[in-house]
Amino acid sequence: MRRKKKDAAPAVAERSRLGQGAGTEAEPTAPHQLNPKVIAGRWGWPGAGRGRAANLDRGAVYIGTTAQVGGLYPFVLGAGLPPEGVPIGPDMLTHELVCFDPGGWVGKLTQNPGVWVMAQPGAGKSALTKRIATVYSAYGYKMVVPGDVKGEYAPIVSGLGGQVVRIGRGLDRLNPLDSGPLRPLLPTLPEARREPLLAEINGRRGELLQALLATEVGLGRRPNATESNVVTHAIRVVSEKLLGEDPVVPDVIALLRDGSDALWSRLMVDTEDEYRAHVREVTLALENLCDGPLSGIFDGATTTPVNLEAPALSVDLSALLTSGNNVVAAGLLATWAYAYSSIDSARALGMMDKPLVLPLDEMWRALRAGAGMVDAMDAMTRLNRSKGEVTIFVTHSLRDPESLPTPEDRAKALGLMDRCDSLVLGALSRGELERVSAQRPLTDAEMAMVASWSSPTITGVDGTTQQHRGRGKYLIKIGTRAGTPVRLELTEAEKDAYDTDKAMRRGRGQQ
């Protein structure tokens, strides 16, 4: 009896559904001849060249809340830094927009709003600093440049509607003993409040005058205990005689030259010769601050007081550059103390509530101004979080802090970098990066990338100098996070406003 042949169609369909071969009738002969009636299995189409998988991963199950999973999407790379603050440019690896917000990240990514910017000359440090300061001014910060050595911030401050004070012989004059915005308040206050405030003002006057004496145009060293005592007392005496008005340095000099019973008693001397021996050197040093290259700069009343209502402030010292580094150093100390102390005092009295952005370009000049400037910077980095100040320190090398004369000053200067949670590195040599890594660890890949930007500037056969290879390239390190490489893209307006090479081009007859 013949056995009846079973119908093979159901089996063929089942094997096709499972991805198994079902004979030549069910299999397409080529990928472009796929039979739409046959459904591929989980492993794909069977046969060579048809994408069939030899093994299928069962996958893993992850559980998360809707808040965690809501932003999840395949193939998206997480951003290196939050997209908030100052737009810098594209990430050099992922091409996403990189933003920088040292003030807004405090308490989130950072613990301190300080920024340390370091790169070779010509790599674009100033351009980045100006971009940050300008955008922050649009966010409600007051840009304050208390020592604009090259005068390059003055056009930007003027464009923002701010105040530019130009210090120099025949220009604006600055009184180191000026009490700033506190002076009009003194006569109106009751005695119980006036006395502590006057003591605070005199204390600041004494600190600044002693810092100026420590520069090369003064004593060239820190005043000793006797000199410090007599200067502080002389300031207090002349201030009491001029209540409602600020004393000037010549007033202090006149009192020291004439002497008084109070000064003799202060110094515990009995004869004029003893008194002269104690005050001669410090008196002559004070006279140096009012004569010679500094004549007409610190020897009278302030001609242009700080305008607290202005959105920006620049104290332009470019007129002092021809007088030498010692004069510039003294100018930096005086302008920093005057501008910063005026704003700090006004803020303490509720006369100003704006946060500050303080770009300190040409940091090497400021550091060499003397111990007073190092102390001022040290105090700023310790208090800028509580005061809402974004301080930007710009330098070429860690050798700048290391060149200070005393171990105490060197330790303070090197500590500035440690208290800046935001580190921005431009083109630097391998040796310089190793010094940085000793304080703020860098990976080998980060050092290799930054060092690759540090090739020297190329000069063409026609004498024209091309821009630095690493110009506009930076590695932004926030705390211990991996660095984010970014390329700064300037607008046409910024290219003109931030240009620091105009003098070089004029020297070669270029535009």
Image (cartoon, grey):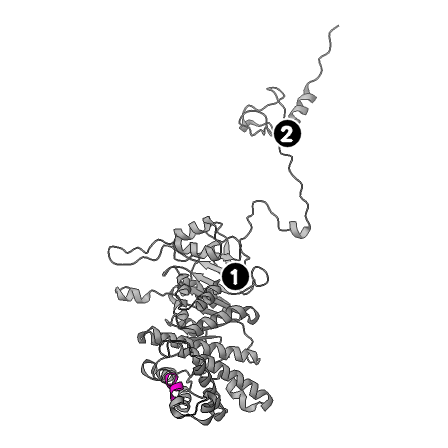
Q: Position of residue 108 (x, y in %)?
A: 59, 60
Residue at horizontal 50 percent and vertical 84 percent from the top: 202
Structural crowding at the residue carrying mark 1, measured as other residues with C-alpha within 10 Å and reported as few (<14), some (14–19) or many (≥20):
many
**SS at mark 2 in the image:** loop
Q: Main secondary structure of the magenta part?
A: helix
Q: Quadrant of residue 499?
A: bottom left
Amino acid type indicated by mark 1: Asp
User: Residue at label 2?
Assistant: 41
Note whether residue 309 is visible.
no
Q: Is residue 320 left or right of residue 487?
A: left
Magenta-drawn segment: 276-283
Nearest to the observer: residue 360 or residue 364 = 364
Q: Quadrant of residue 167?
A: bottom left
User: Residue at label 1?
Assistant: 421
Q: Residue furthest front?
A: 270
Nearest to the observer: residue 185 or residue 294 = 294
Q: Is residue 365 above or below residue 277?
A: above
Structural crowding at the residue carrying mark 2, measured as other residues with C-alpha within 10 Å and reported as few (<14), some (14–19) or many (≥20):
some
| Residue 325 is one of the magenta-drawn residues | no
